Amino acid sequence: AAVRSGVIARASAPIWKPARRFALPVGLLLSSAGGWLLVEGHGMTDPKMMLGLVLVTIGSPFSTFGYLGLIAKWAEATPGPVTVFFARGGTSSLTAYLIQGLIFSLLFSAYGFGYFASLTAAQTIGVAFLVALFSVAFVSFWRIGFQRGPMEAILRRWTYLGAR
């Protein structure tokens, strides 16, 4: 319905303002409280941990809606170099996602460096931020020279294989 009505494509749609003002704070509050309970809990059967999972699950749609409102607000502005950088990266999100999966599996699995459950929460968040930044930077720089990301090009060729 949002796509058909054009709300998704219109950054100035009236729905994005309440998304930013109300949904985002609610989502962040619920997710933060849930995250705190998850850290405080001990084991999956601990009631604190279960309540934390419930709060994060309930808060996630609110946060997502709020973040979409922020992206819509950002899209209203005149595109600058940062916007163009992230937009290029966003058009190759499959490649970025696969790069992230590859890096995380190498860092955290037993066949890689084996860092699973050995880093603090702050270290893990830092690693996640750096990996995300690297993957978006890689695909953004890739898109300077190519029309699509490498995985998007492969997927497009495979999708239209029978049409040629």
Image: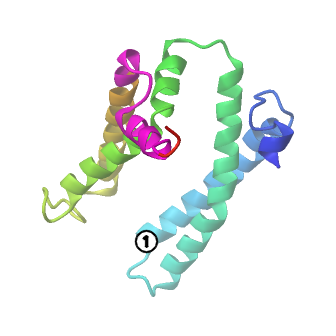
Question: Which residue type does callout 1 highlight?
Answer: Glu
Between 83 and 115, the one nearer to me in the picture: 83
75 in the magenta segment: no
- Residue found at x 23% / y 63%: 116
152 in the magenta segment: yes
Residue 12, quarter of the rendered image = top right
Q: Secondary structure at mark 1?
A: helix
- Residue found at x 53% / y 25%: 87
The answer to whether 54 is drawn above or below residue 141 in the figure is below
- The residue that disc 1 covers is 40
Between 133 and 34, the one nearer to me in the picture: 133
x and y percentages locating residue 156 in the rendered image? 46, 39
- Residue found at x 87% / y 34%: 14
On screen, residue 44 versus residue 51, left or right, reads left
Point out the stretch of residues depicted in magenta.
Answer: 141-161
On screen, residue 28 versus residue 159, left or right, reads right
On screen, residue 14 versus residue 162, left or right, reads right
Residue 69, quarter of the rendered image = top right
